[in-house]
Amino acid sequence: MANTGKNKLVRWARLFVGGYDLSADSVGLDKCENSMELVELTGWSDSVVHGLASQSRKVGIYGYQAYLNDTALSGAYTILKTPATRTVSLLFGGGAEPTYGDPAYIIDAAQINNLGSFESGSARFAADFIPHPAYYLTGSPLAVILSPNVARTATFNGTSHNNGAASTNGYHATMHIIASSGGTWAYTIEQSTTGAFAGEETTLATFTVNGSAVTGEYKSATGNVAQYLRARGVRTSGTCTVIICIARK
């Protein structure tokens, strides 16, 4: 992704919540948090402070604002008016729509508010999304896009992504079906030690979602992750639009 400045980065940000694309209603975003608060213990060494389990891990999407669109099927009002637990993926593109290899921020999220307001004559929601408590110590929300927002009409193999090296601490991943004709698909994330994907690849993750309806899914697992990854969708029937992102722990 080209470094084209923060304005273009935000302009091409795309938010997906539980399979619904809220990007068209988006107005603003405060921050995507991934930090650790230190406990004040004057006189204690850094090594002691950093080892304390009482440090507060802060992860979440804060200050997301959207127009109260109550006409579109997937409008922000319809989705955000009742706070719920949903898979959330925020995709970033540098000067264009987010695509393979671009960054994303992913969490299995609980929406914790839906604050209404009027600004410049428009009605808006402000929502925050935080992860389940168990998520806080299991990995970074910073991910990479393996399958961008593209309509699929046939079995596909996504572009191979090079992670730079293998890892041993597992992964977490999100997927969204944002459009479906009601068919049947099988979605996986494959891994390869060489990047050839010529028969040596293995399946890293298998999603439960079958592409028959708009929805989202979050997966997390421990273990080894190879250097090269790609998304794969095998079509039995129908068409769909699927987004898949992954972060290594």
Image (tube, rainbow, N blue to C red):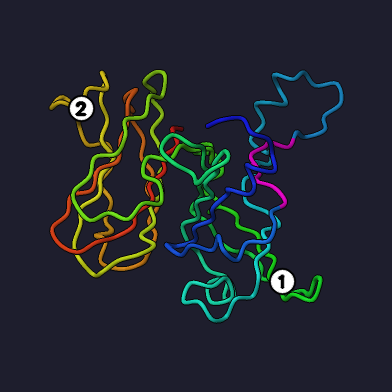
- Give amino acid for label 2: Phe
- Give the magenta range: 30-37
Q: Main secondary structure of the magenta part?
A: strand
The part of the image, by quadrant, that contains residue 164 is: top left
Report whether residue 120 is seen: yes
User: At which x and y percent is residue 119?
Assistant: 80, 71
Mark 2 crowdedness (10 Å alpha carbons): few <14, some 14-19, many ≥20: some
Find out whether residue 95 is within the magenta segment: no
* Front-most of residues 102 and 213: 102
Q: Is residue 135 above or below residue 22?
A: above
- Residue at mark 2: 197
- Residue at mark 1: 115
Q: Residue at x 36, y 51 (%)?
A: 150
* Front-most of residues 198 and 113: 198
- Give amino acid for label 1: Leu
Q: Residue at x 30, y 66 (%)?
A: 180
Q: Is residue 232 left or right of residue 142?
A: left
Q: Is residue 96 above or below residue 117?
A: above
Q: Is residue 168 left or right of residue 44?
A: left
